Amino acid sequence: MSYRSKIFCAASSIFALALGGASAGAASLQLFNVEGSSGTSATSINASGTVTGTCNGGPCSRHGTAYFRTSDGTVTTFNVPGAGYTQASGINDGGVITGFYDVNNADQGFVRNAGGTFDTFEVTGATSTYPAAINADGAVTGVYYPGRNTLPQGFVRASDGTITAFAVQSATSTQPQGLNSQGAITGVWSDQSNTYHGFVRAQSGSISTFDVPQSAAMILTAINDKGVIAGTWEDHASSDHGFIRAADGTITTFDYPNGLATIAQAINVHGAISGSYVSASGVQLGFVRAPDGTFTSIHAKYNVTDADCINRHGAVAGSYSHYLGSRFGAFVRTP
């Protein structure tokens, strides 16, 4: 699977339906789509409850038009000027959005400032550049491809526009996935046997690698402003589980109770984690894991719910669909 396909947390009207969240008590669940689109995904949510993501089909580009939705339900779609398509991957608390866009059949990065102006960029010599996350200062991390038929490597772009490429020593690929306000980056890297491991890169540039004990592969990682990492690991039976890595390196694993698989995707500053699990009946649902380890299930609609991102207040955004690969919509759950 390509890295681009892994990047999922002008005014348009939307339809929205308020529902009570499964096992959520007083929580509110809103489903939404960019009007007329065939699909809307959510990839990131900031502290004010603004969600960003991508819509497809209808008024949106077939391959994607970016949007942001404010907490009052107002949706604004946008494209980088001249782009064939635009996909958003992250938003910070200042409303600055990052993502990638197509130009001359190559994907490059962008930063959209809160006022609507764009800064576009690419890693020097790269055939494609894919931002994955943005922090409070406007720094961006992600991957780039140094050439055709090559594996992705990491980069960080400082708020002043300076780009630094980096790689884990001896890695065949380095894939940053999360970035906190202190400039620490986490992600996965592959070795010569194509096994994936975790890493954390300090703002100074020093890199530490880690694995969940007895894991076959590390899959997803995210990091909060306290340096706590959460993510997903795969065992030797190809089953997925969640983990938390404390700032001191201590690792704790977890699973949704009675679930067949657990995929942890995001962590907020308080240690609450959002993600997805496969129920005993084979349905994929979302979850929130509280800092005390208790779980809340999220069923947005249909058979697949992905709780992709969570903000500091515990609001969760994500996507839902009938089944993997089908028409999809987005949701916001507020506690």
Image: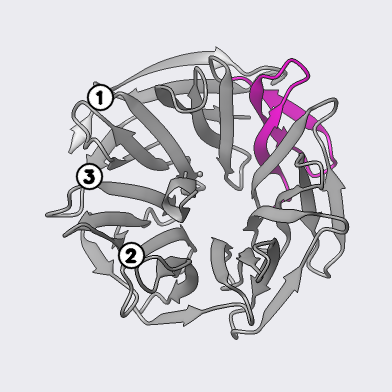
Q: Is residue 315 left or right of residue 158?
A: right
In 3D space, how far apart are the residues under numbered discs 3 and 1 (Cα atoms)? Answer: 14 Å
Up the image or down, 127 lies above or below 266; here it is below
Q: Cβ–Cβ below 8 Å for labels 2 and 1?
A: no
Nearer to us: label 3 or label 1: 3
What percent of the width, then of the height, locates residue 292? 85, 42
Residue 54 is at least partly visible in this image: yes
- Above or below, 136 relative to 76: below
Question: Alpha-carbon neighbours of circle 2 within 10 Å: few (<14), some, or many (≥20)?
Answer: many
Mark 1 is on which residue type? Ser
Disc 1 designates what residue? 13
118 vs 169: above or below = above
Q: CA distance from mark 3 to mark 2?
A: 21 Å
Q: Residue at x 63, y 66 (%)?
A: 190
> Which is nearer the eye, 304 or 184?
304
Task: Identify residue for label 2.
Answer: 128
Q: Residue at x 87, y 63 (%)?
A: 250
The amino acid sitting under disc 2 is: Ser
* Quarter of the image that includes the C terminus: top right
- Sooner in the amino-acid sequence: mark 3 or mark 1: 1
Q: Which mark is residue 78?
A: 3
Secondary element at tag 3: strand
Tell me if residue 115 can be seen: no
x 63%, y 23%: residue:
27
- Could you tell whether 64 is left or right of 185 in the image? left
Query: Callout 1 environment at 10 Å: few (<14), some (14 to 19), or many (20+)?
Result: some
Look at label 3 and name its amino acid.
Answer: Phe
Image quadrant assignment for residue 269: bottom right
Count of marks placed on residues? 3
